[in-house]
Amino acid sequence: MRSPQSLRTASVAIAAVTALAWIVTAALGLNDQAAAAMGFIPDRFSGGVLAHPAVLAVLTPLSSTLVHSGFLHLALNLLILLWCGSWVERVLGTGAMVAIYVISAFVAAAVQWAADPNMNVPMIGASGAISGLIGAFALSFGRPRRLVKSERVNRWLNAAWLLAAWIVLQLMTAFLARSDGLWLATPAHVGGFVAGLALQRPLLLWRYRKA
Protein backbone atom coordinates (compact mmCIF):
# COMPACT_ATOMS: atom_id res chain seq x y z
CA MET A 1 0.00 0.00 0.00
CA ARG A 2 1.45 3.38 -0.98
CA SER A 3 2.20 6.03 1.60
CA PRO A 4 -0.45 8.75 1.74
CA GLN A 5 2.25 11.39 2.31
CA SER A 6 1.35 13.46 -0.76
CA LEU A 7 -2.39 13.25 -0.13
CA ARG A 8 -2.63 14.35 3.48
CA THR A 9 -2.29 18.08 2.98
CA ALA A 10 -5.62 18.93 4.65
CA SER A 11 -4.85 16.64 7.58
CA VAL A 12 -1.49 18.34 8.07
CA ALA A 13 -3.05 21.80 7.72
CA ILE A 14 -5.69 21.09 10.38
CA ALA A 15 -3.05 19.59 12.67
CA ALA A 16 -0.75 22.58 12.16
CA VAL A 17 -3.47 25.13 12.92
CA THR A 18 -4.54 23.15 16.00
CA ALA A 19 -0.97 22.89 17.27
CA LEU A 20 -0.28 26.58 16.63
CA ALA A 21 -3.41 27.60 18.53
CA TRP A 22 -2.30 25.62 21.59
CA ILE A 23 1.29 26.84 21.40
CA VAL A 24 0.17 30.49 21.30
CA THR A 25 -2.30 30.19 24.18
CA ALA A 26 0.13 28.14 26.28
CA ALA A 27 2.99 30.57 25.65
CA LEU A 28 0.78 33.49 26.71
CA GLY A 29 -0.59 31.60 29.71
CA LEU A 30 -4.14 31.89 28.37
CA ASN A 31 -5.25 28.25 28.33
CA ASP A 32 -8.05 28.79 30.85
CA GLN A 33 -9.25 31.95 29.11
CA ALA A 34 -9.20 30.18 25.73
CA ALA A 35 -11.24 27.30 27.12
CA ALA A 36 -13.84 29.68 28.55
CA ALA A 37 -14.07 31.78 25.38
CA MET A 38 -13.73 29.09 22.68
CA GLY A 39 -14.95 25.91 24.38
CA PHE A 40 -18.33 24.35 23.69
CA ILE A 41 -20.64 25.01 26.66
CA PRO A 42 -23.98 23.15 26.37
CA ASP A 43 -25.69 25.57 28.76
CA ARG A 44 -25.29 28.37 26.20
CA PHE A 45 -27.72 26.47 23.96
CA SER A 46 -30.13 25.99 26.84
CA GLY A 47 -30.60 29.67 27.63
CA GLY A 48 -27.51 30.19 29.76
CA VAL A 49 -25.69 33.53 29.53
CA LEU A 50 -21.95 33.99 29.91
CA ALA A 51 -20.49 36.75 32.04
CA HIS A 52 -17.41 37.09 29.82
CA PRO A 53 -16.68 37.62 26.10
CA ALA A 54 -16.76 34.45 24.01
CA VAL A 55 -16.93 33.12 20.49
CA LEU A 56 -20.43 32.95 19.01
CA ALA A 57 -22.08 29.87 20.48
CA VAL A 58 -22.87 28.39 17.07
CA LEU A 59 -19.16 28.43 16.18
CA THR A 60 -17.91 26.83 19.39
CA PRO A 61 -18.21 23.22 18.16
CA LEU A 62 -15.35 24.17 15.80
CA SER A 63 -13.45 26.68 17.93
CA SER A 64 -13.34 24.16 20.78
CA THR A 65 -11.25 21.83 18.58
CA LEU A 66 -8.42 24.38 18.79
CA VAL A 67 -8.25 24.33 22.59
CA HIS A 68 -6.55 21.53 24.55
CA SER A 69 -5.93 21.00 28.23
CA GLY A 70 -2.24 20.21 27.87
CA PHE A 71 0.54 18.89 25.66
CA LEU A 72 -0.37 15.21 26.07
CA HIS A 73 -4.01 15.92 25.20
CA LEU A 74 -2.89 17.81 22.09
CA ALA A 75 -0.23 15.28 21.07
CA LEU A 76 -2.57 12.29 21.27
CA ASN A 77 -5.24 14.04 19.24
CA LEU A 78 -2.77 15.19 16.58
CA LEU A 79 -1.24 11.74 16.30
CA ILE A 80 -4.64 10.16 15.61
CA LEU A 81 -5.65 13.04 13.33
CA LEU A 82 -2.54 12.70 11.17
CA TRP A 83 -2.83 8.92 10.94
CA CYS A 84 -6.55 8.39 10.44
CA GLY A 85 -7.11 11.70 8.66
CA SER A 86 -4.39 11.08 6.10
CA TRP A 87 -5.74 7.65 5.18
CA VAL A 88 -9.35 8.84 5.08
CA GLU A 89 -8.17 11.66 2.83
CA ARG A 90 -6.49 9.13 0.58
CA VAL A 91 -9.62 7.02 0.23
CA LEU A 92 -12.37 9.64 0.19
CA GLY A 93 -10.58 12.79 -0.96
CA THR A 94 -9.60 16.02 0.72
CA GLY A 95 -13.04 17.64 0.64
CA ALA A 96 -14.70 14.57 2.13
CA MET A 97 -12.13 14.31 4.91
CA VAL A 98 -12.64 17.96 5.86
CA ALA A 99 -16.42 17.51 5.70
CA ILE A 100 -16.25 14.52 8.06
CA TYR A 101 -14.07 16.47 10.48
CA VAL A 102 -16.33 19.53 10.54
CA ILE A 103 -19.66 17.69 10.60
CA SER A 104 -18.41 15.30 13.28
CA ALA A 105 -17.40 18.27 15.43
CA PHE A 106 -20.95 19.64 15.28
CA VAL A 107 -22.59 16.23 15.78
CA ALA A 108 -20.32 15.55 18.75
CA ALA A 109 -21.32 18.88 20.30
CA ALA A 110 -25.01 18.20 19.66
CA VAL A 111 -24.82 14.79 21.33
CA GLN A 112 -22.95 16.24 24.29
CA TRP A 113 -25.65 18.91 24.63
CA ALA A 114 -28.39 16.26 24.44
CA ALA A 115 -26.65 14.25 27.17
CA ASP A 116 -26.21 17.21 29.52
CA PRO A 117 -27.92 20.38 28.24
CA ASN A 118 -27.22 22.37 31.40
CA MET A 119 -23.52 21.59 31.62
CA ASN A 120 -21.59 24.85 32.06
CA VAL A 121 -18.08 23.38 31.92
CA PRO A 122 -16.39 24.06 28.55
CA MET A 123 -15.86 21.01 26.38
CA ILE A 124 -12.51 21.41 24.65
CA GLY A 125 -10.35 19.37 22.29
CA ALA A 126 -10.66 17.92 18.82
CA SER A 127 -11.59 14.44 20.05
CA GLY A 128 -15.19 14.60 18.81
CA ALA A 129 -14.17 15.63 15.29
CA ILE A 130 -11.32 13.12 15.26
CA SER A 131 -13.71 10.38 16.42
CA GLY A 132 -15.53 10.93 13.13
CA LEU A 133 -12.29 10.32 11.22
CA ILE A 134 -11.70 7.18 13.28
CA GLY A 135 -15.17 5.93 12.36
CA ALA A 136 -14.59 6.61 8.65
CA PHE A 137 -11.15 5.02 8.86
CA ALA A 138 -12.46 1.89 10.58
CA LEU A 139 -15.22 1.47 8.01
CA SER A 140 -12.87 2.14 5.10
CA PHE A 141 -10.23 -0.40 6.07
CA GLY A 142 -12.16 -2.93 8.13
CA ARG A 143 -13.32 -6.03 6.25
CA PRO A 144 -16.88 -7.02 7.19
CA ARG A 145 -17.41 -10.68 7.91
CA ARG A 146 -19.76 -12.55 5.65
CA LEU A 147 -22.47 -13.34 8.19
CA VAL A 148 -25.41 -13.26 5.78
CA LYS A 149 -25.79 -13.39 2.01
CA SER A 150 -26.59 -9.72 1.62
CA GLU A 151 -23.48 -7.56 1.21
CA ARG A 152 -25.44 -4.50 2.36
CA VAL A 153 -26.58 -6.21 5.55
CA ASN A 154 -23.01 -7.34 6.23
CA ARG A 155 -21.85 -3.72 5.91
CA TRP A 156 -24.51 -2.59 8.38
CA LEU A 157 -23.58 -5.37 10.80
CA ASN A 158 -19.92 -4.38 10.54
CA ALA A 159 -20.81 -0.73 11.26
CA ALA A 160 -22.92 -1.82 14.24
CA TRP A 161 -20.07 -3.94 15.57
CA LEU A 162 -17.59 -1.07 15.20
CA LEU A 163 -19.98 1.28 17.00
CA ALA A 164 -20.56 -1.19 19.84
CA ALA A 165 -16.82 -1.71 20.25
CA TRP A 166 -16.23 2.06 20.26
CA ILE A 167 -18.92 2.66 22.88
CA VAL A 168 -17.47 -0.01 25.16
CA LEU A 169 -13.99 1.46 24.69
CA GLN A 170 -15.23 4.96 25.52
CA LEU A 171 -17.08 3.79 28.62
CA MET A 172 -14.01 1.93 29.87
CA THR A 173 -11.76 4.94 29.17
CA ALA A 174 -14.19 7.29 30.92
CA PHE A 175 -14.32 4.99 33.96
CA LEU A 176 -10.52 4.89 34.22
CA ALA A 177 -10.29 8.65 33.69
CA ARG A 178 -12.80 9.37 36.46
CA SER A 179 -10.82 7.21 38.84
CA ASP A 180 -7.92 9.60 38.23
CA GLY A 181 -10.11 12.67 38.65
CA LEU A 182 -10.36 13.41 34.93
CA TRP A 183 -13.45 14.16 32.85
CA LEU A 184 -14.05 12.92 29.30
CA ALA A 185 -16.81 13.99 26.93
CA THR A 186 -17.88 10.41 26.21
CA PRO A 187 -21.20 11.33 24.47
CA ALA A 188 -19.29 13.66 22.13
CA HIS A 189 -16.83 10.91 21.23
CA VAL A 190 -19.67 8.51 20.45
CA GLY A 191 -21.55 11.15 18.45
CA GLY A 192 -18.50 11.99 16.37
CA PHE A 193 -17.83 8.32 15.67
CA VAL A 194 -21.43 7.78 14.53
CA ALA A 195 -21.11 10.75 12.18
CA GLY A 196 -17.98 9.27 10.64
CA LEU A 197 -19.65 5.89 10.17
CA ALA A 198 -22.72 7.49 8.59
CA LEU A 199 -20.75 9.71 6.20
CA GLN A 200 -18.15 7.24 4.98
CA ARG A 201 -20.28 5.23 2.55
CA PRO A 202 -22.15 8.16 0.89
CA LEU A 203 -18.90 10.09 0.45
CA LEU A 204 -17.15 7.02 -0.96
CA LEU A 205 -19.95 6.45 -3.47
CA TRP A 206 -19.96 10.13 -4.40
CA ARG A 207 -16.22 10.19 -5.08
CA TYR A 208 -16.38 7.17 -7.37
CA ARG A 209 -19.79 7.94 -8.87
CA LYS A 210 -18.33 8.13 -12.39
CA ALA A 211 -16.03 5.12 -12.05
Image (cartoon, grey):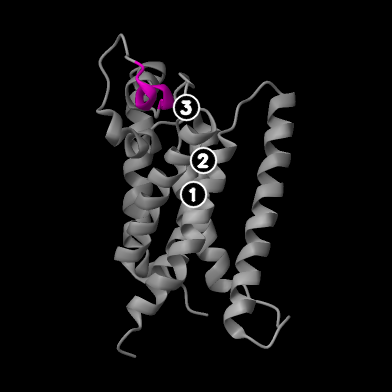
Alpha carbons under labels 3 and 1: distance apart: 17 Å
Q: Which mark is residue 188?
A: 2
Percent position (x, y) of residue 105? 40, 45
Mark in front: 3 vs 1: 3
Camera-nearest residue between 75 and 210: 210
Looking at the image, do the residues carrying marks 2 and 3 touch, with CB atoms under 8 Å apart? no
Q: Secondary structure at mark 2?
A: helix
Tell me if residue 184 comes above or below residue 31 in the rendering. below
Number of callouts in the render?
A: 3
- Depth-wise, is mark 2 or mark 3 nearer the camera? 3
For the residue pair 63 and 195, the one nearer the viewer reads as: 195
Query: Considering only order in the chain, which callout, 3 or 2, is on the residue closer to the N terminus?
Result: 3
> Which sits earlier in the primary sequence, circle 3 or circle 1?
3
Residue 91 location, quadrant: bottom left
Q: Which residue is mark 3?
A: 117
Q: Is residue 83 visible?
A: no
